[in-house]
Amino acid sequence: MLSVRYKAFIYINYLKVLPAALFFVAILIHEFLGWVSLENIITTFVFINLFSILIGMPVLKELECVKRRINWVRMQKLLKREKGFPVMVAPSELMNRLTYYFPILIIEKFFGVTSAGQYSLTLRVCFSPISLITSAVGQVFQADIAQANRDRKRQQGLLTGTFVFKLIFVALAITSIFYFIVPLLVKYIFGPEWNEAIDYIKALSPLFGLMSVITPLTTAFHVYRKNMELLVQQSIFLIISLFSFGLAWYVNNLLLGVVVFSILSAIRYLYILYMLRKVL
């Protein structure tokens, strides 16, 4: 059974990457053939995801055939022992969503529907690849340190100076992609009328770069039951968001608020890396 679950786990991660890869290839083909339009892009996106689901059906069927007996007594003990997890993590996830989407309400009220739509597009375009990468890498990283934790192997020193340097280098590379390449793709797909969104993508690129490489490492907080640390970090993130966009409203300059949000959030991710070095 473990063999089936492991193979399915790897296969499902490949299936997560497949839609994004095919979608990117489709965008390039549409651009080359002159078929780029919002309607064609949406149709292609839906078709590719349906195609990936059909490919993944045999895996789901295989998993369904694996019979597992539920040990209710063990489950009750586990829930009792880990009661701090939902108490801490659920509010953390809620604050994480509010951090990104509550500002849209502020923007819509004080800067208009157009700016709110432009900022919302920025989040949608940039979070899709980031979520895909961080989710897949985070699961693998969590499984590795969880196994090491069960085997009581020492993890201290995992985030060495060399490893941190490599993380920063990769973050800079991803930041460059979001600053130079993603705006070109957005302009090709959505047209020059979305230039405001392009400004937001460039302003948020440092945040996106650090988020891509550090977020997968935060699964260590779950493994070592640092749930309070997660709650504190998300509280800081929400405060940064409210402060930044409150400042934007006060000075009547939305781009300034986005820049402040990006800088403070990037500093927060560096602080998370510092805290992770204590855990790992």
Image (cartoon, rainbow, N blue to C red):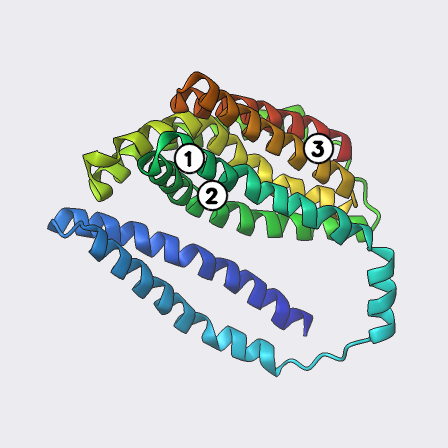
Type of the residue with mark 2: Ile
Using the numbered discs, state the Cα–Cα distance from disc 2 to disc 1 in whole angstroms. 28 Å
Picture residue at 43% right of the left edge, 29% below the top: 205
On screen, 243 above or below 18?
above
Q: Which residue is mark 2?
A: 130
Quick one: SS at disc 2?
helix
Would you call the spot at circle 2 few (<14 residues within 10 Å), some (14-19), or many (20 or more)?
Answer: some
Find disc 3 in the rendering and name its residue: 276
Circle 2 or circle 1, nearest the eye:
1
> Which SS class for mark 3?
helix
- Where does the image place residue 263, in percent across and percent down from the top left? 51, 21
Tags 2 and 3 touching, CB below 8 Å: no
**Foreground residue, 66 or 84?**
84
Q: CA distance from mark 1 to mark 3?
A: 38 Å
Considering the image in quadrants, where does the C terminus appear? top right
Q: Quadrant of residue 230?
A: top right
